[in-house]
Image (spheres, grey):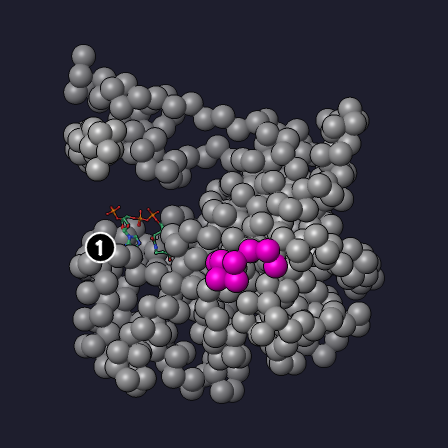
Amino acid sequence: MSTMKEVLKKKIDEHRPRTAKLVKEFGDVKLGDVTIAQAIGGARGVKCLVTDISYLDPMEGIRFRGLTIPETFAALPKVPGSEYPYVEGFWYLLFTGDVPTMAQTLEIVEDWKQRSCVPQYVIDVLRAMPRDSHPMAMFSAAIVAMQRDSVFASNYTAGKFNKMTCWEDMLEDCTNLMAKLAPIAAYIYRMKYKGDTHIAADPNLDMGGNFAHMIGQSEEYKDVARMYFILHSDHESGNVSAHTTHLVASALSDIYYSYSAGINGLAGPLHGLANQEVLGWTQNFMEKLGGKLPTEEELKKALWDTLNSGQVIPGYGHAVLRKTDPRYESQRQFCLDTPGLKDYPLFKLVSMIYKVTPPILEEQGKAKNPWPNVDAQSGVIQWYYGLTEYDFYTVLFGVGRALGCLANVTWDRALGYSIERPKSVTTAMLETAAGIKK
Ligand code: HAX
């Protein structure tokens, strides 16, 4: 170990009990308007972000522009022959707060098609990366590579920045980016997992349908893609991916810098990567049992083993929610309504995990929310339709999450929100506030 690392290790070991004591014994002490627990604990519950795109109630769950998930699906124009709406119409709803007509929706469908061609240099960047790079690293690199095409950045550099109208450049960039995300994701998928063979876009399809087509999926999967992208779009602006996008954009960075950063946050196992982790955990467990379904006792043991080894149960818990995530319920309903999926062994196991896990997390007594989040259910649907490359699941999340993040930052620009800059204090200051130190 290097000298510096040794010194650092000693200091960290000395420092940790100070932080733990502050949280445990003095967490409620106020520092201005926030408590010590909030300052150390990831600003949990601090009301210092504003967004009108979506709102997350701890007990009710998400509302997109005031609409619950079932209300959203019911209100938006549907793709002909499908029970699910156009993702493009949902984009209109998030930006404007209005439910679009079919004509307004189709205008966006056409607009995205015109903008959807992925530049060759982006393909070159992807192809230059080692093939075993994580698909989220590829996705992020592809997004930031397109920064050279930012209308906002180019106008800013040319001295044409105008605080009142700069949101228009942001909207232009966001639309260009959104239109390309699903084709980029499809390219990564086919390059990495399908022998580098690619399928051209079908000009007759909407965004969700085309994504299914371009990854080589079935007709039924088109609705899965539409549902998945909408469900994963937004969860108010405090989650890591949305907040990172907002934070980076607050420095007037363009959307390519900002959303690439948001994607990097989404790639964390406590956030979007949890959907990959859930499938990994479930599959490993089933493999150990030789592919058969476990008994409840076997499952309980595996869950306790995971907790006792210091790991989290992926797909369970939430920073805001205090009940089962409605996005989980919505996907569960999809499984129950889909013949074949209802009796699918993996779905049965996921349902058993749903029954067994909350009481175990309650008994352990750490997690404030023992209920499942969106990630606990999404992988089983993908797996059923043959999309078994679970390290790709967070890319799917990233395509959907863009809908909300991009709407948010366009509004940030329109309302001239400030560069973000919370204030830091030292541990010694906290100890003084707590009365531990003079
Ligand atoms: N399994 C085991 N322990 C858990 C847990 C879980 N699923 N959820 C929370 N805890 C633990 C925390 O690790 C924490 O332990 P320490 O005190 O030892 O640090 C304690 O319970 C209190 O945590 P909390 O206040 O309930 O939860 P946080 O707001 O700190 O964290 C997380 C919220 C979602 C990160 C957390 O519940 C978690 O790690 N869940 C598992 C990973 C996961 O599913 N992530 C996806 C969340 C949804 C999402 O963002 N999707 O993208």
Taking the image as drawn, is residue 12 in sight?
A: no
In the image, residue 251 lies at what x, y percent?
59, 29
In the image, residue 147 lies at what x, y percent?
67, 42
Which stretch did the figure color magenta? 127-134
The residue type indicated by label 1 comes to: Gly
The quadrant of the picture occupied by the N terminus is top left
Q: Nearer the viewer, residue 400 or 62?
A: 400
Taking the image as drawn, is residue 306 in sight?
A: yes
Majority secondary structure in the magenta region: loop
Residue 47 sits above or below residue 179 on the image? above
Identify the element where label 1 is drawn: loop
In the image, residue 398 lies at what x, y percent?
55, 56
Residue 227 in which image quadrant: bottom right
Q: Nearer the viewer, residue 11 or 399?
A: 11
Is residue 131 magenta-colored? yes
The quadrant of the picture occupied by the C terminus is top left
Is residue 229 magenta-colored? no
Q: Nearer the viewer, residue 248 or 146?
A: 146
Horizontal side of 24 relative to 197 (left or right) equals left
Q: What residue sits 59% from the left and 32% below the top?
A: 250
Q: Nearer the viewer, residue 366 or 194?
A: 194
Count of numbered tags? 1
**Label 1 crowd bin: few (<14), some (14–19), many (20+), radius 10 Å:** few
Residue 176 sits above or below residue 35 on the image? below
Give the residue pinned by disc 1: 310
Q: What residue sits 27% from the left and 23% below the top?
A: 427
